[in-house]
Image: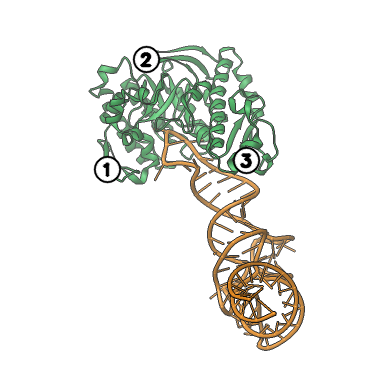
Amino acid sequence: MSFSLLHKDKTSKARAGVLKTARGDVRTPCFMPVGTQGTVKTLSNDELVSCGTELLMANAYHLYLRPGGKILKKAGGLHKFMSWKGPMMTDSGGYQVFSLAVLRKVKKEGVEFRSHIDGSTHFLTPEKVIEFQGLLGSDIMMPLDECLHYPVVKNQVEDSLKTTYHWALKSQAAGCRSQVKEKQQLFGIVQGSTYKDLRKRAVEEIASIGFDGYAIGGIAVGEPRELIHEIAEYTADLLPENKPRYLMGMGMPLDMVEAIAEGIDFFDCVVPTRNGRNGQAFTTEGELQLRNAPFKEDFRPIDENCGCSTCRTHTRAYIRHLFNTEEILGLRLVSLHNIYFYVKLIQIAREAILENRFSKFREEFKEKFKKRIGGK
RNA sequence: GGGGAGAUGGCAGAGUAGUCAAAUGCACCAGACUGUAAAUCUGGCGACUUCGGUCUACGAAGGUGCGAAUCCUUCUCUCCCCA
């Protein structure tokens, strides 16, 4: 299990590589679709594969609540349960510390969650989270961390970093780790909000523990766009060069291309699926709000240059009609197109890096991609 | 032919003298969404506007009254029941 860098761009910090996992190689940079509950909403595994998906993401916290460890164990792990044969990463529940803030209490030993499903309380410790991901059998595990909101005062970030560091130590030392180290990689997560000195301290602490890869967390939780990139680049620069770097949760197309130039290898984001279900499609020329009136009689595909099954088969007008009439197929068609677009975009960027034309690709993409097509 | 009910903004439907440019829902028009509590949420939706207002509006016409979608008269139309 190792990460190898194949090529570095000369005009930026972009890099192309391969991460070997127990279930196959993942080419980087890589976008992984988010399948929180063991499914990328609305899409089948075959469809994900047809989009070029190499790595999938699921969420330990959500799967712990439902269907729960007992069933997942009986099923033989998450791969078998959901019939996904390729590599998979699982997030820990650290993001839920942020997104379900009203339902949890962070303590030194872990997080107490009140289930958003039935109100029952659960105490998650870093060890339990690793143990659960061991049971899931994910190829890349994430440790429990504390993802903070933005903005947040500095001394609160300092306190939080102590917790995340403490949990990182516990995660790496968890009893079950030694048996599965060969099969299940573990990434460390760097927090620190928008404070550079704290990001630096976090990198030093987390890297000193030693992980198979490093994630930059607590990004894109409300900061201005420029600040996202400033912090992401600053943090990426400090991370070990020979390990994969994962920018957690970020995602608009332009931002991912920029982040690749900042030295990021892995992305995940709910935007292609969530926004897809809400009628927003991404193309090389920009975003389409397909529910909007201008598409009523637009009989072109979402993207003329796209090879996905949605674009090969259906028109904007038809998809708008599906949203307009609340037909389920609309959600699926746009989700599929968006996943294809995201996965391909990053793969195209990778090819550009390997062929020494990344800066040209980056400039052309920025030039062409408009915020919005049709509508305001 | 006799008796009864009713006509409100694109539709459905509240309101029954002042706080009504008129509730609410739908439709329509936009916006948001970043390690998914999301097929969700938010805003707009008579015209004009120097954004303070101004004007035109509750089937039609006329009336009462300081004031009418709301009361009275006539007319037009719709629905229901009985013959």
Q: Residue at x 25, y 17 (%)?
A: A179
Asked if badges 3 and 2 are on one and the same chain, I answer yes
The residue under label 3 is A321
The chain letter corresponding to orange is B
The kind of secondary structure element at disc 2 is loop
Q: Horizontal and vertical percent for residue A84?
A: 41, 22
Q: CA distance from mark 3 to mark 2?
A: 44 Å
How was the colour assigned to the protein in this rendering? by chain
Q: CA distance from mark 1 to mark 3?
A: 43 Å
Q: Horizontal and vertical percent for residue A231?
A: 47, 31
Q: Residue at x 61, y 15 (%)?
A: A357
Q: First in sequence: mark 1 or mark 3?
A: 1
Mark 3 neighbour class, 10 Å CA radius: few under 14, some 14 to 19, many 20 or more:
some
Residues under numbered marks 3 and 2 in contact, where contact means CB atoms less than 8 Å apart:
no
Look at the picture and state if A163 lies above or below B56: above
The residue under label 1 is A121
Q: Horizontal and vertical percent for residue B28?
A: 64, 49
Tag 3: amino acid: His
Q: Residue at x 36, y 35 (%)?
A: A62
Mark 1 neighbour class, 10 Å CA radius: few under 14, some 14 to 19, many 20 or more:
few
For residue A267, side relative to residue B75 (left or right): left
Q: Which mark is residue A22?
A: 2
